[in-house]
């Protein structure tokens, strides 16, 4: 994988990669702040004047652009990376190994911290609309339409979806 890239190409890739990273970070923050489901559309939610659907589109396409840019960045900088790593290993294997272990610990710790922050509690909730009822039990949403309510009893619906009819509608 040897590619001799001119300095202007390396600089251009790094600059575009930096801009795309910033835009992905902003769109990620917007999506994190956005109300879930269709609520954002219903209330006309925007972040910096942009709707949730637009932020999702921007985030997705820029993610693909970033994948390509990172690939180009790694290809044109691969030889430099190998030379630097060889040099580092010659000087002090302990420091390099320690650095790799530290990076691994930070990544694993970050994963667990993120997982703990985003974990959802098991809940039961019910919302009613003109079309029927949407019941969420243990993070699983069950849509019950008006025609189902007309033709089935609560016990039959509970048996159909394997839930306890006495405990499934408590808030």
Image (cartoon, rainbow, N blue to C red):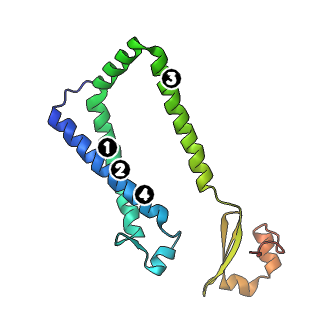
Task: Report if the CB atoms under discs 3 and 4 are less than 8 Å apart.
Answer: no
Q: Indicate left or right for 83 with 102 as reference.
A: left
Tell me residue 14's x, y (percent).
Answer: 25, 41
Query: Which is more N-terminal, label 4 or label 2?
Result: 4
Quarter of the image containing the N terminus?
Answer: top left
Tell me residue 142's x, y (percent).
Answer: 67, 71
Q: CA distance from mark 2 to mark 4?
A: 14 Å
Residue at numbered disc 3: 98
Q: Residues within 10 Å of mark 2 (few under 14, many from 20)?
A: few
Query: Which is more N-terminal, label 1 or label 4?
Result: 4
Residue at numbered disc 1: 68
Q: Residue at x 82, y 72 (%)?
A: 167
Task: Report if the CB atoms under discs 2 and 4 are less than 8 Å apart.
Answer: no
104, 65: nearer the viewer: 104
Task: Report if the CB atoms under discs 2 and 1 are less than 8 Å apart.
Answer: yes
* Labelled disc at residue 64: 2
Mark 3: secondary structure: helix
Tell me residue 85's x, y (percent).
Answer: 37, 20
Is residue 139 among the parts visible in the rendering? yes
Q: CA distance from mark 1 to mark 3?
A: 31 Å
166 versus 85 height, above or below: below
Mark 2: secondary structure: helix
Q: CA distance from mark 4 to mark 1?
A: 19 Å
Q: Residue at x 67, y 63 (%)?
A: 139
């Amino acid at each position: 994988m040897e590619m001799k890239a001119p300095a202007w190409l390396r600089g251009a890739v790094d600059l575009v990669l930096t801009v795309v990273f910033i835009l992905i970070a902003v769109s990620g923050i917007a999506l994190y702040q956005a109300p879930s489901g269709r609520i954002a559309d219903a209330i006309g939610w925007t972040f910096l004047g942009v709707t949730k659907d637009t932020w999702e589109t921007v985030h997705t396409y820029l993610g693909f652009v970033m994948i390509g840019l990172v690939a180009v960045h790694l290809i044109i900088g691969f030889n430099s990376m190998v030379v630097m790593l060889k040099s580092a290993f010659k000087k002090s294997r302990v420091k390099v190994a320690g650095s790799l272990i530290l990076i691994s610990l930070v990544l694993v710790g970050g994963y667990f911290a993120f997982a703990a922050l985003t974990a959802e509690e098991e809940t039961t909730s019910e919302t009613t609309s003109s079309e029927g009822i949407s019941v969420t039990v243990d993070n699983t949403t069950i849509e019950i339409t008006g025609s189902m309510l007309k033709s089935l009893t609560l016990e039959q619906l509970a048996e159909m979806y394997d839930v306890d009819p006495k405990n499934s509608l408590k808030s």
